[in-house]
Amino acid sequence: YIGFGRLNQLSSDYLDEVDRIVKLGLKGVKVHTRKASVLVMQDAFDKLEKYKLPVVVHTANCKNSSVRNLRELKYSGPVIIAHGGKDHMGDAIELVNIRKNYYIDLSCISLWRTKHILRKVDHNKILFGSDSPYSNQRLDVRRVKLAVRERKVRKKVFSENFLKMMAKGI
C-alpha cells in the first residue's frame, strides 16, 4: 500500500494539511469534491507545486465532482482522475489523452467502463488504485484481470505506470 493524505478544502486549515502530508512522507494527496470543486482550492495546488505530489481527484455525478472542472486546474504535478471519471468518462479520456500529467484510475468502475478506457487511453496512463475502504480490492483486481488479458499491459496498469509516474514526478 502507498499512503496518500487527504485534503478537505472545506476545512479552515487545509493549507496546513499540505505541510503535514509532506512531513509525514505520504506519497500523494486525495481530494474529494462532492461538497466543493477543486477550483476553490487553487492555493493548495500552488503550494503543492514545489513537491509535485500526485493528486487523486474524486469524480462523481454531481457538479462539483465533474471532470470538466479539471480542465481549468493549474497544476504541473500528476493529476489522477479517480473512478475513470464516472459519468464524465468521455471528458476524462479526452483530458488524459491531451495532458501529459493526467492519468486515469480504474477503481470503483464497471467491467464495461474498464474495457472502454483500455481501448481509448494510452496504456501508459492507466493506473490501478483501490478506493479503500469503499471498494473491494479483490473484486477490483479481478475486474481488471478480466479486462486486461495481456500480461505486459497488466503489469503496466497494476504497477509500472505508477512507479514511473512517481519516479519522474509527472
Image (cartoon, rainbow, N blue to C red):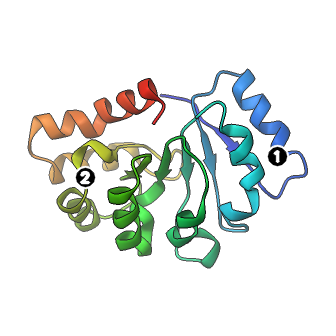
* Residue 160: x %, y % from top left: 29, 30
Which image quarter is the C terminus in?
Answer: top left
Compared with 63, 75 (above or below) is above
Label 2 residue SS? helix
Which residue type carries mark 1? Answer: Tyr
Disc 2 from disc 1: Cα separation: 35 Å
Which residue type carries mark 2? Answer: Arg
* Residue 101: x %, y % from top left: 44, 46
* Residue 152: x %, y % from top left: 13, 34
Q: Residue furthest left?
A: 150
**Rendered residue at 52%/52% (across/down):** 134
Label 1 residue SS? helix
Compared with 134, 20 (above or below) is above
For marks 2 and 1, give the one nearer the viewer. 1
Please name the residue that numbered disc 1 is placed on: 14
Cβ–Cβ under 8 Å for marks 2 and 1? no
Q: Residue furthest right?
A: 12
* Residue 7: x %, y % from top left: 72, 46
Along the horizontal axis of the image, is 64 left or right of 61? right
Mark 1 packing: few (<14 Cα in 10 Å), some, or many (20+)?
some
**Rendered residue at 54%/39% (across/down):** 54
Along the horizontal axis of the image, is 81 left or right of 16? left
Compared with 64, 97 (above or below) is above
Q: Nearer the viewer, residue 86 or 124?
A: 124
- Looking at the image, tell me whether mark 2 or mark 1 is earlier in sequence order: 1
On residue 143, the disc is: 2
**Rendered residue at 32%/35% (across/down):** 161
Mark 2 packing: few (<14 Cα in 10 Å), some, or many (20+)?
many
Q: Quadrant of residue 124?
A: top left
Q: Quadrant of residue 96?
A: bottom left
**Rendered residue at 47%/55% (across/down):** 82
Compared with 112, 55 (above or below) is above
